[in-house]
Amino acid sequence: MIEVLGLRFEKREHSNRLWQASMTLLAIIVALLISGVLIISAGPNVGKAFAGLYAGAFGSWKAILETLVKATPLILTGLAVTIAFRGKIMNIGAEGQFFAGAITGYWASTNFAWMHPVLHFFVIILSGFIGGAVCGLIPGLLKGLLKVDETIVTVMMNYVVQFILSFLLSGIWQAPGEFYYISSPVPESVYYPVLFQNSRLHVGFIIAIVATIVIFWLLQKTRLGYEIRTIGLNPTAAKFKGINVSQVIIITMLISGGIAGLAGVGEVVGLHHRLRMDISSGYGFTGIIIAMLGGLNPFAVIVAAIFMGGLINGSNRMQIFSNVPTALVYAMQAIVLICLLTFQVLANYRIRRVKVVD
Amino acid sequence: MLSAMMRIATPILLAALGELITERAGILNLGVEGIILTGAFFGFFVVYRTGSIPLALLAAVLAGGLMSLIMVFMAATLKVDQVVTGLALNLLASGITFYWYRVAFNSIGATPTIEVMKIAKIPLLAEIPILGEVLFSQHLLTYFAIIMVPMIWFFINKTKYGLEIRCLGENPRAIDIKGINVTRLQYLAVAFGGMMGGLGGAFLTVVSAGIFLPDMSAGRGWLAIVVVIAGNWQPLRIILATLAFSFFDAFQLQAQSLGVEFPYQILLALPYILAIILLTTSRSKSEAPGHLGLPYNRD
Amino acid sequence: MEKSKPLLRTLKLTKRFGEVIANHEVSFEINPGEIHCFLGENGAGKTTLAECLYGYYYPDEGEIYFNEERVNINSPSDAIRLGIGMVHQHFILVRPLSVIENIVVGTDAARMFLNLSKATRRLEQLCAEYDVSLDLSAKIWQLSVGEQQWVEILKVLFGGVKLLILDEPTAVLTPQEAKKLFVILRKMKQGGLSILFITHKLNEVIEVSDRVTVLRRGEKVATVNTSDVTRADLARMMVGRDVVFRVNKPEVEVGGPVLEVKKVCARNDRGQEALCNVSLNVKAGEVVGIAGVSGNGQKELFESIIGIRSIDSGEILLSGTEITKQSAQSIASQGMGHIPEDRLKEGLVPDFSVAENLILGLHKHRFFKYGGGSLDTKEVESFADKCIKDFEIITPSSRQPTRNLSGGNIQKVVIARELSEHPICLVANQPTRGLDVGAIEYVHNRLLMQCEKGTGILIFSDDLDEIINLADRILVIFKGSIVGKLDPSTASREEIGLLMAGSLEVEL
């Protein structure tokens, strides 16, 4: 029960989905309002800013495609966090798992040249998954077998993997002649095919959609998914009814890491076509926001990812139209999350005035 | 190089001591990274605009405190998930500081710089060979950070509020039933943590770099959290851990500048790997506050 | 004898939790310098009443008088100010900190710079007064349970107290520690302190109290002078002489043993011994009822049998096969069903639909095609519909979130699930706790029906009526041991009550 300023918030017995969805919407609206205030306080025209934002995100077919490009890794990291959070596993390591997948995916793309292209394609995807999965396995084992809290461990792994990447890119994988930490380009034959001419939208988007369907299926229709959900909602009952909680935790982290790894390999082979230090702008952490925005529902994650991708994509247009720096959208993402957390609490509570007992 | 070690250690130590108090009060504030960044920005901004370093430090402290108020409001009043909130705070700081930086300095062509704070040599002691340079020719903030170590130790172990905070982090109910306002205490503890973090951030710009770069906190906030774990939540061990990690950092910087070829990344990754090992092996001996990260509900 | 002014008096105190009435118009009084006991079974309302006196709960109706002045106790701080202190059954201590730190925090003695010399002296004085030796600088986790309890008492004494409330203080003590506690309590009484002692153990009431208030099902039965009553009188008052609704128990042919528990020793979550050489057996078609007040090892025994608690020694056999070291899942698959004590926390996932909860546990080998890859919704739905029909679960559909159902129907979901696979043995822990009369009747009927099908049932209950109604054989558990074996047709409630309260040792 929360008490603040003479109002008491009592927990509702049931919180229905409609109320929660409308709270999400309210959170987004309030977040946009706050962002508007931020923009005004700095001078530029709010109207132009939001107009530019929208135009850049969804204003034209080209814009939409580019938004989807930005959304692709976000869908995958959002899914990765979703499946972990559903099992009440705090996987904050999607960023590291992303990079791990990028590393192994890059390695697979520059080897196996002798393979048939289609086979090579699937091998690359698989190695991206495996890289991320291995990265997720470590915190998974520590939590499942030794009951070590995964929150800090996953964050630490983020840094360890990024240092491994730095090591590789400054050494054996550094492109000859390059000063920066950047690899040689991936052979053109293994580029992810582009879906539409004149756009950057690549088959990674399809992979993301397929992954969404798979994760949805996994959670709702399989025995493993059933057990994950049970553990996430009531680990005590899970134990009483014979579910092997440790095993499920380990498997969940494998899958979660693997999905994030798919995001990584996608950015390397589908977009940048090289391995670099900056292939992620915090996609792992943004994935957390997307998972929360999507209410931990895989299909809603797609919507949330497109929304976020739109914000990131549209920010360029916004800057051109109204001089509002693109950096604002990162603040907007955070504001959306904070509003969401706040309003979700309100959705679960009923407000009562505190009766003063005399 | 040892001098560099002290310079690298200062912001981390300041933030870590702040985070220590926050965590002893039971709240896991993962937003330290964002708080440092906020402090760095406001420190820089105020010096640029007013030329006054004391004012800038004050601004940084207040800014850090304000950011942390968001954290404690979400954690102690609304009782939402502390981990996600902390991460949101990092993202917020990253975006807002970058945004405001662009807005404020858009028109300026070259990179805006400020004059950094000068080293404050302690007379006489600074003349001592080696030790004089390392310990007594540092900036005021560094002396402050070092002095804070025993002061925080004293506060936690020998004062009334320190005792209450220790109880709070272990078993909030124990002091709740004695009529102590648990929420108010958490607000104070977290605000202190934020102010220290802000000060640490200010060091980066006002003392060290003289410029502001986006995301210049560069993982120092996370290092502060790691150092609290490595120091087993005790001030003396925290400064030792901080110095150890800073030493490796200074060492690899020196080695790089000399052109020595070696995988420096290993040294940089060391604190993080160590943290994982510590979390795994010393679970039984860990002095982590028992109620850390858990929301407290009276019923 | 001169009638002195009562120290504390309640008038028609009533406390409700939603629909449940925990205390109903309870009026009683405590005199200064008196040791007063609250006696009653679980759920009688003893602790709730005490919490109202301590300010943790606020009574819905009724009045409290302290020294004949009407008072409102809204929070523990109010109670402390009046001079009322409480030691809870589960200690509220800060384990890594020292004794003196735990006592001093939040009191006036804690000055800014924690000069503890004055406090230390006062505490040493108190310890000497009651002849207790305690190292004030020791950390709580280093102390024995008895010493920790003394710290809790010191916390109260330190602030100056007129009325000390103790909630089941001997529940965690060894007999020697309990004896020591009573010596201390008598000394306190001589010093003018009043003590309110909550217990379900008759021996303690007789040994230490001046007067006793017996509570039953939220009502006060009587307040008597301890010297005026016998143990038997108290037992009778405690468990009552209601006309009991007797279920028609069909004659069932009893078969071979389905469950055998042999000399099992186990510990509780705190690492203390909870079960000591427990042996029992259940035969096919019979109901064995274990009577006892909650907290005497039932939880640990239940969990050991179903396989989620490992035991220190002994054996458990299901239909002759040893299941001692097996996993919960493998035990369940061999024909063990269970109804847990806390259906919402241990038995179901409240946010799941009725159908999803019905398949919990059974999902391991049914309801999924392709080795777990695809949910067979048809099979689930038809199974769920069948359960809803066969077990009369009232719900709009099988897709309804389970938490929306009434308590009785939630229990029906658990029962439907556990009985649907026709278990060889069914273990039920307080299966009708918190249910209304109709639901209780339902549960009893279903259990007996299952008996007819040959299942052996072991039921733990702190409700004597239930045990007498259902059981073919009665066992009584007290402090982790079986202290009595009775035949329901010949045993008296009084006898069972005495055994439950640790007051009798029957030849086993």
Image: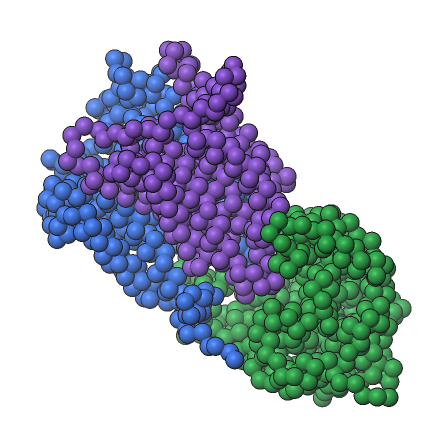
Chain colours: A blue, B purple, C green
User: Does residue A189 appear anywhere in the picture?
Assistant: yes
Residue B63: x percent and y percent?
35, 45
The answer to whether A188 is drawn above or below residue C154 in the figure is above
**What residue appears at the point 33 percent right and 21 percent down from the top-left corner?**
A169
Residue shown at 35%/29% (left/top)?
Answer: B117
- Of all residues, the one furthest to the right in this rendering is C507
Give above or below for A163 relative to C243. above
Looking at the image, is B6 positioned above or below residue C480? above
Q: Residue at x 18, y 51 (%)?
A: A40
Q: Nearer the viewer, residue A153 or B10?
A: B10
Q: Give the residue displayed 60% in from the left and 68% down from the top.
A: C77
Residue C264 image point, x, y percent? 77, 55
Closer to the camera, A319 or C464? A319
**Residue C247, visible in the rendered structure:** no
Q: Residue C178: x percent and y percent?
A: 82, 63
Q: Position of residue C448 (x, y in %)?
A: 65, 75
Along the line of sight, the residue nearer the viewer: C75 or C158: C158
